[in-house]
Amino acid sequence: MRIAPSDLKCCQGRRDFIKIGTMGLGGITLASLLRDQKLFASPAKDLNCIVLFQLGGNSQVDTFDPKPEAPPEVRGSFKAIKTAVPGIYFSELLPESAARLRKFAVIRSMHGDDAIHESAQQYVISGTKRRNDLVHPALGSVVTHEWGAKNGLPPYVAVPSMSRSGGAGFLGSLYDPFNAGDPNAKNFSVKDLTLPLGMKLEQAQARAELLKALDLRFRQVERAGLLERMDEFYQKAYDLVSSPAAKKAFDIAEESEKTRDSYGRTAVGQGALLARRLVESGVRVVTVFHGGYDTHTENEPGMKKVNTEFDRAFATLLDDLESRGLLETTLVLVLTEFGRTPRLNNYAGRDHWPRSFSVALAGVEISGGVVVGSTTPTASDPKDDPVSVEDLAFTVYKVLGIDPNKEFHANGRPIKIANNGKLIGALFT
Amino acid sequence: MVSGERVGLLLFMAAAVGFLVADSAQPVISGVSVEGHKGDESGPAARKGGADRSGEKPVPVLPRGVPKKIVLEPDGIHLSHPGVTQRLVATGHYGDGTSYDVTEACQYESLAPGVVTVSADGVLKAVAPGRVFVRARMGRTSSRISVSVANNQAGVTVNFGQDLLSIFTQKACNNPTCHGAIAGQNGFKLSLFGYDPKADYEMIVKDKNGRRVDLENPEQSLILRKPSLSVPHGGGLRLPKDSQEYQTILNWLRQRATYNADGPRVVDLEIFPKDRVLVGLGTTQHLVVLGHVSDGATRDMTREVRYQVKDENIVTVEPDGRAKAVAPGQTHVMIRGMGRVSVACVGVIKEPPPKDYPRLVADNFVDEAVFKQLRRLNLDPSELSGDDEFLRRVYLDVIGLLPTPAERERFLHDGRKDKRGRLIDELLARPEYAAFWTTKFEDSFRNHQTPIQSRAQGAFRRYIYRFLDEDRPYDEVVREMLSSVGDQTQNPAACFWAPMADIVVDDLKVNLATTTVSRLFLGSRMECVECHNHPLENLTQNDFFDLSAFFGQLRLKHGYEAYRRVWYLDPDRKVLHPRTKEPLKPGIPFDRSFPVRSTGDHRVDLARWITKPDNPFFSRAIVNRVWREYLNVGIVEPFDDFRTTNPPSNQELLDGLAHYLVANGFRLKAVHRAILNSRTYQLTSRPNRHNELDGPQLFTHYNVRMLPAEVILDALARVSGVEQRFQFYPKGTRAIDVIYPDYPGYFLDIFGYLQRLSLEERRKEPSLSQALHMMFGDTVLTKIQSKDNIIGQLLKAGKSDEEILNELFLKAYARNPAAEELNLTRRYLADGQEKGLERKEVFDDLLWIVLNSKEFMVNH
């Protein structure tokens, strides 16, 4: 099929397929994405990434950046507790993380300016703000684009699902994440990845074969490229369902009850466990979306619930990765789209506050026990070493070995994947 | 010597290639070269090198012979002073409608060599001031153009603005990855493609204490040493020391490196030929670029512009302007230089349309325009669709619903000749048409919970629905929206502005309004010019600012309750120029002469200009969108990216539809009708052996496409007989009628339902999540497993195997199963029953198969 790129290429010179970046054109098909390693750069180091995304905006004051000296309407009623690093205190909501601060780094001086959930989420997970027509791809989509897949598994998995902000943007739907579903659900099986109860594989096969035969007749008559592409995905979907390797990777029930309990029987806990399991099997990037942080009313019970769950999951994940020797090759990110208002509102809640928020990083070259930057006494703005969302993205790509200045083509112009940021040197002491 | 034998051989050969010797305009299959025996009035003997005219250049053998007419281009050549040169391009037009580049085959003659001389390959050179005709001849056909020479010595000195910027553009110094990037390279920044000569001059001569130029030792200037690689240069060797460009810069330095501010500037570029179909793969075509200079002269810019081809698989172009045909199709060649752009349309056909090219039956002006182009490009459209195919397609395209078996019966048995036209009218009158197309408009107006909160979202939807249902004139609706103020729930037209607001600071983002309005109503993407001059269009950053000034007066505040938004005007508020901080006066970049009042609501003036009947963009932008919905590809594609360098694939078609809309009072249904009733729309989707590889924008057959998300969901319910329930909505609600506040649910999300936060279009591509969800997910599963689904109902009614199968096919595909399909499914049923499965179970499998089949999920 003749390639007819609708975007004018701005630069003369080498015309490699990867620059075109749209599904199906230039030879990148699903099959080649999942199988053909030749088309992709080999990462210098075979790295993975697990993102725990706190959806809704985690309150910095109630978690990583407590302000025990601030007035009560700012500090809330949670106490500050010691961490493994002398002089650094966390909120009492994160005891297990606090005890393990030597294994990860925290940035307290994050700042942004977007207070709308969807766009701020997209901003943080991609590192670049959405413009009128241009949506930058999420971290996992970029990694997929650069490295392809491993072991025939989907390279980018979202737990439970993409959350509308973790998608591939201008790279095209080929690089969207695979949605795994909620691993904490009873009888969890990956969303859509199992045969209906009671159906035997044989029957599924017979049914699939007849589908194939009918589709083939249709395709032969219509001869449209779209049908070939649809067929590819259906074939792959079927393979995944009948593939023991894929099933095994997603089969969280294989983990012992003890392990499952240690992560916590919560969405984020089981999500983190599944993420560990998946990167072990060959998935490159797993993003676990944990909701419930948007505490406009009754901030404290809300924060207590989600952060306790998070604390357990995060701490156990770090321990688990470390004991399996995976921490050197797995970058762990704890992200949120913005912080929350330092001053409690009339409903005892906190509202959106993009001017300062906290994130955490662990693994690969990230130094443990580091706290980057600080905020003002009421945590309203960064005080020392402000870090922008662009800086964070730049640094993350650098750690993974992906050039943030690499150019993609979208809407007829060259776009750098994470420009306008600078390296956060303090993370690598 | 002409012996009888030889004549016989000639005639044989003539017959073999299908033409007669006497007529000079016969089609010939390209690639066959019959030496010296081409159709030519002067007879075969004379063709052997033109031996009867001594001293003349031998005419090279072409497959085409002598043309009926020769056209010389460019016209309007005004050479600025003696010594200046200009290339010519000669086109031979032949009786069968084809054209060839005969530049190198012509003999040239200047009728006053003391004024202008012309070389054997058609390059003019000015000798002395005056005016002269230059003639080109091929055989007995000749043509001439007028050329004038002035005595404008100003051009003799090297002109920074013209000469140096030409070089920087041609050599790619100022392109976006090198020094034209926002931050330049290594501290040296040039304006992108040379749009700001003053800034470039400052940078080269004054910046960094002038260390880039050395007037005492010009050759030591960094501006020369770097590109000639005398010192390390990240860009490598760009200007070898022996190149003409190096010499030009050196001369400029020797002349004291002045700016020459009063010097003439190139104000426009023209490319010749503007429009050409190349016949034969490998055929070449000279392109010539004429620059129009501010002093009235012209300048040969052929080698001073950058060429870029939209689709290099069809045509390639060398830096010297020579184009070559690679594969059949149509594309565009864009030229760029001196901050200006222009474009030529180039098609390629393997061979001329044969005499027996089928006479295509045009049903209306749409067909006339499309078929004219098909003939030009020697393309072969598919057959007309059958009734089954047409029925299912038109239902899905117009109202987003599958036809019921009863509706199908009625249509098939309708014996009237105009039944298709009548069906189209019926469908356009149905409320489902308005409901379906409302969603499309909601996508582009971004009717979403986040910008347009709660009740206003519903009010806006109803507003759009009414506009479509009543077929209100589109220009009226747009004027209404553009001039709207008030509470969004009371005046839903004001919801139009909501996606451009910053709700955190409660204000309109003027830049966002500018880009949104220009995209939606002018089809122009102005995002680029927010930050710099447009690299692909003749638009500047100042154009952007002037347009943004129309929106400065619009303010936003919260109403009584949370989430109530009220728009109001602050008539004295101005938009400030971001750099100079001067208040901007609203001005329309595309029509500076359009009167804009200094008081009153500026948006009203803008709306007046946008919606005036002869506005070149407004009508074209909307008809292009409607066309795109039906044909899956816009006449201009991307559909909201109209620019000089992205011309329509069929200008006549676009113009025709636009005029039709205006002539019908901007009522959209008229355009729907024109498109739907055309043969072009009604062609089958099946390619024939000639057009299978044709690009989709050539419209030689209907383009197969995936159905939109809501349509699939509704179709699943219809075919399976199991309703899809939506929270808070009563039974019987269709997916297309639901207002989704935020997250539309997993199914719609993965099938492309838009978040509507940015101006994007729905994804029409398949994905792994879709495949998994359809095959193994709960949306389909619950329908398969339901006891009372269609299978259950039909079994209860005692239907036979064949009847059930038939019913499934009729509902899902609007056709009966073919014999082979019946066999396959009968075998499956038999196997199933052998394995001890229940009849319902096996039929449920068949339902699963039908719902997962590609034929179900696409429109073809």
Image (spheres, grey):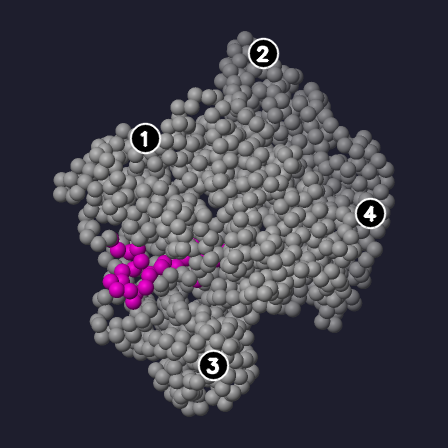
Q: Which residues are magenta?
A: A166-195
> In this view of the protein, which residue sits in the foreground, B511 or A105?
B511
In the image, what residue type sits under mark 1? Asn
Q: Is residue B415 above or below residue A372?
A: above
Q: Quadrant of the N terminus of chain A?
A: top left
Toward the top, the furthest residue is B4
Q: Residue at x 80, y 44 (%)?
A: B297
Please check whether the numbered discs 2 and 4 fall on a single chain: yes
What residue did someone put label 4 on? B295
In the image, what residue type sits under mark 2? Val
In the image, what residue type sits under mark 3? Val
Q: Residue at x 45, y 48 (%)?
A: B737
Please check whether the numbered discs 2 and 1 fall on a single chain: yes
Q: Nearer the viewer, mark 3 or mark 4?
A: 3
In the image, what residue type sits under mark 4? Asp
Tell me which numbered mark, 2 or 1, is placed earlier along the sequence.
2
What residue did someone put label 1 on? B816
* Chain under disc 4: B
Q: Position of residue B595 (x, y in %)?
A: 78, 49
Neighbour tally class for label 2: few under 14, some 14-19, many 20 plus, Cα within 10 Å = few
Assign the magenta stretch its main secondary structure. Answer: loop
What residue did someone put label 3 on? A61
Local SS, label 2 = loop
Q: Nearer the viewer, mark 1 or mark 4?
A: 1
Tell me which numbered mark, 1 or 4, is placed earlier along the sequence.
4
Q: Quadrant of residue B614?
A: top right
What residue did someone put label 2 on? B2
Q: How many marks?
A: 4
